[in-house]
Image (tube, grey):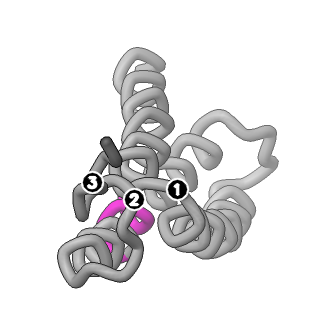
Amino acid sequence: MEKRATPLHSDKGSALNLGLRVVFAIFGAYGFSVLAGVAFARGGPFSSPLDAAAFSLMLGFILNVCAIVWVFAAATVSRAALGLLFPAMALAAWLHFSG
Protein backbone atom coordinates (compact mmCIF):
# COMPACT_ATOMS: atom_id res chain seq x y z
CA MET A 1 0.00 0.00 0.00
CA GLU A 2 1.43 3.37 -1.02
CA LYS A 3 1.79 6.10 1.61
CA ARG A 4 0.05 9.31 0.72
CA ALA A 5 2.11 12.47 1.34
CA THR A 6 0.65 15.27 3.41
CA PRO A 7 1.02 18.87 2.22
CA LEU A 8 3.20 19.85 5.18
CA HIS A 9 5.83 17.21 4.62
CA SER A 10 6.65 16.45 1.02
CA ASP A 11 4.27 18.04 -1.47
CA LYS A 12 6.28 21.08 -2.57
CA GLY A 13 3.55 22.21 -4.95
CA SER A 14 0.74 22.80 -2.49
CA ALA A 15 -0.44 26.29 -1.65
CA LEU A 16 -0.27 25.68 2.11
CA ASN A 17 3.31 24.48 1.86
CA LEU A 18 4.33 27.50 -0.19
CA GLY A 19 2.45 29.88 2.08
CA LEU A 20 4.14 28.51 5.19
CA ARG A 21 7.54 28.72 3.56
CA VAL A 22 6.91 32.35 2.59
CA VAL A 23 5.86 33.19 6.16
CA PHE A 24 8.93 31.44 7.59
CA ALA A 25 11.16 33.15 5.02
CA ILE A 26 9.82 36.61 5.85
CA PHE A 27 9.42 36.49 9.62
CA GLY A 28 11.66 33.61 10.67
CA ALA A 29 14.64 34.70 8.59
CA TYR A 30 14.28 38.28 9.81
CA GLY A 31 14.10 37.21 13.45
CA PHE A 32 17.07 34.89 13.12
CA SER A 33 19.23 37.46 11.33
CA VAL A 34 18.43 40.19 13.85
CA LEU A 35 19.27 37.91 16.78
CA ALA A 36 22.53 36.83 15.14
CA GLY A 37 23.49 40.43 14.40
CA VAL A 38 22.80 41.56 17.96
CA ALA A 39 24.66 38.58 19.41
CA PHE A 40 27.68 39.22 17.22
CA ALA A 41 27.66 42.96 18.04
CA ARG A 42 27.64 42.14 21.75
CA GLY A 43 30.22 39.38 21.70
CA GLY A 44 32.45 40.40 18.83
CA PRO A 45 35.91 41.95 19.19
CA PHE A 46 35.17 45.50 18.09
CA SER A 47 37.08 48.66 18.97
CA SER A 48 34.05 50.95 18.79
CA PRO A 49 30.28 50.64 18.93
CA LEU A 50 30.06 52.04 15.40
CA ASP A 51 32.21 49.19 14.07
CA ALA A 52 30.05 46.66 15.90
CA ALA A 53 26.83 48.14 14.52
CA ALA A 54 28.10 48.36 10.94
CA PHE A 55 29.54 44.86 10.86
CA SER A 56 26.50 43.34 12.56
CA LEU A 57 24.20 45.03 10.06
CA MET A 58 26.16 43.54 7.17
CA LEU A 59 26.21 40.14 8.87
CA GLY A 60 22.45 40.37 9.38
CA PHE A 61 21.85 40.96 5.67
CA ILE A 62 24.01 37.98 4.71
CA LEU A 63 22.36 35.69 7.26
CA ASN A 64 18.90 36.85 6.18
CA VAL A 65 19.58 35.77 2.60
CA CYS A 66 21.06 32.45 3.78
CA ALA A 67 18.02 31.80 5.98
CA ILE A 68 15.61 32.54 3.13
CA VAL A 69 17.49 30.14 0.87
CA TRP A 70 17.41 27.54 3.67
CA VAL A 71 13.62 27.82 4.05
CA PHE A 72 13.00 27.12 0.39
CA ALA A 73 15.72 24.48 0.05
CA ALA A 74 14.73 22.38 3.07
CA ALA A 75 13.06 19.06 2.29
CA THR A 76 10.05 19.68 4.53
CA VAL A 77 8.34 22.69 6.05
CA SER A 78 8.93 21.36 9.55
CA ARG A 79 12.66 20.97 8.86
CA ALA A 80 12.75 24.53 7.54
CA ALA A 81 11.00 25.83 10.66
CA LEU A 82 13.21 23.88 13.04
CA GLY A 83 16.30 24.96 11.13
CA LEU A 84 15.42 28.55 11.95
CA LEU A 85 13.96 27.99 15.39
CA PHE A 86 16.79 26.09 17.09
CA PRO A 87 19.61 28.50 16.15
CA ALA A 88 17.38 31.47 17.03
CA MET A 89 16.59 29.93 20.43
CA ALA A 90 20.29 29.30 21.07
CA LEU A 91 21.15 32.90 20.18
CA ALA A 92 18.31 34.25 22.33
CA ALA A 93 19.45 32.13 25.29
CA TRP A 94 23.03 33.30 24.85
CA LEU A 95 21.90 36.95 24.72
CA HIS A 96 19.73 36.47 27.79
CA PHE A 97 22.35 34.78 29.94
CA SER A 98 25.37 36.79 28.77
CA GLY A 99 24.05 39.87 30.49
Disc 2 to disc 3, C-alpha distance: 10 Å
Whether the magenta-drawn stretch holds residue 28 is answered as yes
Depth check, mark 1 against mark 3: the one in front is 3
| Precedes in sequence: disc 2 or disc 1 | 2
**Which residue, as the protein is rendered here, is positioned at the far left?**
16
Bounds of the magenta span? 26-31
Q: Nearer the viewer, residue 38 or 20?
A: 20
Quadrant that contains the C terminus: top left
Secondary structure category for the residue under label 1: loop
Residue at the (38%, 32%) spot, across then down: 89
Give the class, few, some or many, for how many residues have Cα within 10 Å of label 1's Cα (few <14, many ≥20).
some
Disc 2 to disc 1, C-alpha distance: 7 Å
Cβ–Cβ below 8 Å for labels 2 and 1? yes
The amino acid at mark 2 is Ser
Q: Which residue is mark 3?
A: 4
Q: Which residue is mark 1?
A: 75
Which label sits on residue 10? 2
